Structure formats: C-alpha cells, structure tokens
Amino acid sequence: MPKAPTTPSPRRGVEERYRKEDLIAWNREYREKGRVWRGAPPQLPDLPSGSRVLELGCGNGKTLAAMLRRPWRVAALDISPLAVRLGGEVAVSLQDAPSESDLLAADAVLLPFRDSAFDAVFAFHVIGHLREEGRLQAAEEAARVLKSGGRLFFLEFGVEDMRADKGLEVEARTFRRGGGVSTHYFTEGEVLELFDALRPVSIRTDRRIIRIRGRDHLRSEVGAQFIKVEG
C-alpha cells in the first residue's frame, strides 16, 4: 500500500519548484537528443533469482536492459515520461529476457511504494541531479522501501571529475550546465552521511582518464553499497 502522507518540509515549496524545472530540462534532453547515454552500463551485482529490485531514474534504459537480463523482478521509474517511454521500448526489444519490468513516471523523492518492498535499490546517476533537500528525501525514501537485509547500490560523479566546476554553481558543488540539468559532485564522506540510516558495506572512488579532442580529462565516480539493518 502507498505510504501515509508526511509533514511537508519548510523547503518543500522551493524543492517542488526545482523539481518542475528539472522535469522540463529532462524532457527537453530526451526530446532533442533521444537516447542521451550510450556505452556499457555499470557493473551489476549478483542477487538471488526472484529478487525484487528498483531502479531510480531509468533514463534511456541502458542499465534497465542489463537488469532485464537477470532473473529479477524489476521496477523502474523516472521523473520524465519520455524516459519511461524509452525504457519501455528497451523492455519490448528484449522479448527473450528472463525478467519483466514495471515502468512508471514517478519522482525519487516521493516513491509510490509501500515500506520494505524491495530487496535492492539501484541509484545510479540520479540522486546527483537533485538539490540538497531532494537528495535527503530520496535517500530517506530509498531506505524506507528496502527490506531488512536489503541492499542499496549507489553511483555518482566525484568532486575530482572533469566537470565538477563547470557551469553555474546553484548550490555547493552542484552545477547547472547546457539545457538546465544540474549535477552534484560527491565526496565519499558526503555519501556516507547521506545514507546514515543504512550500514555501509563498501565505498570507493574510481578514477579514469578519457581523451577528448586530443586532451586528457579525469572522470571520477563514487560507488557505494549499503545494507538495511533493523534495530
């Protein structure tokens, strides 16, 4: 059953305005660029067959496609209906995949799922597109829908990333570029603090050099795994 309404945050009105701006920006990205991200999806963990998993921010379906090849029960959401449509096209194209998916347009800061509904939650490059209040709400929601013993898998860009100081700084270490999409760049300590309701299993920063137009640039990503422990 859906969760009961909560008392609004003093900043809820401001956050809702930001989320409307985000939706406009993301719809524009997908309308103009279609499948925004290409390349290989992040590496997925081994989970038991039949695990109920949730992907926050399915985007163009790149990670969703990899999930559908696993024997899991997959739910995926995105704030952009255009992204959900792209994800649906991916699901239809994988007719022989062992998994089926439930896709819906919804916001990570207010998940339409009951408490303890999932064995795992994947938050890959989605929470970093929220403002501070939204990041806190999304982290709380992710912990709420996890079962006891459930795992959260997190991946976002780190503070050393090549784009960490590019664009308009709208909050500390949060920059808005191009079509209006904002990205926050994380430290490991910040990630641990954000998910303080969960027990950390691992955290690390991966760095790699990419070459663009004859110049080397650093890509930096913080990856972490958490487990929900009751009591």
Image (spheres, grey):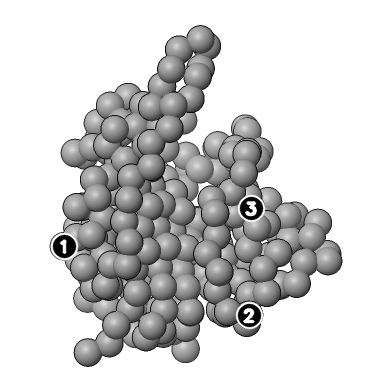
In whole angstroms, how far apart are the C-alphas of marks 2 and 1?
Answer: 42 Å
Coordinates of residue 6 in the picture (x, y in percent):
27, 78
Q: Secondary structure at mark 1?
A: loop
Residue at 44% in and 26% down: 209
Q: Nearer the viewer, mark 3 or mark 1?
A: 3
Coordinates of residue 119 in the picture (x, y in percent):
48, 79
The residue closer to the viewer here, 150 or 134, is 150
Q: Quadrant of residue 216?
A: top left
The residue closer to the viewer here, 47 or 117, is 47
Q: Earlier in the sequence, mark 2 or mark 3?
A: 2
Per the rendering, the mark at residue 49 is 2
Q: Quadrant of residue 178?
A: top left
In whole angstroms, how far apart are the C-alphas of marks 3 and 1?
Answer: 34 Å
Q: Amino acid at mark 1?
A: Pro
Above/below status of 111 relative to 185: below
Coordinates of residue 130 in the picture (x, y in percent):
34, 50
Q: Residue furthest top?
A: 214
Instruction: Return the residue at label 1.
Output: 10
The residue closer to the viewer here, 203 or 32, is 203
Coordinates of residue 11 in the picture (x, y in percent):
19, 58
Instruction: Return the residue at label 3.
Output: 61
**Is residue 159 left or right of 178 when viewed as pictured?**
left
Q: Secondary structure at mark 3?
A: loop
The residue closer to the viewer here, 84 or 68, is 68
Residue at 67% in and 68% down: 70
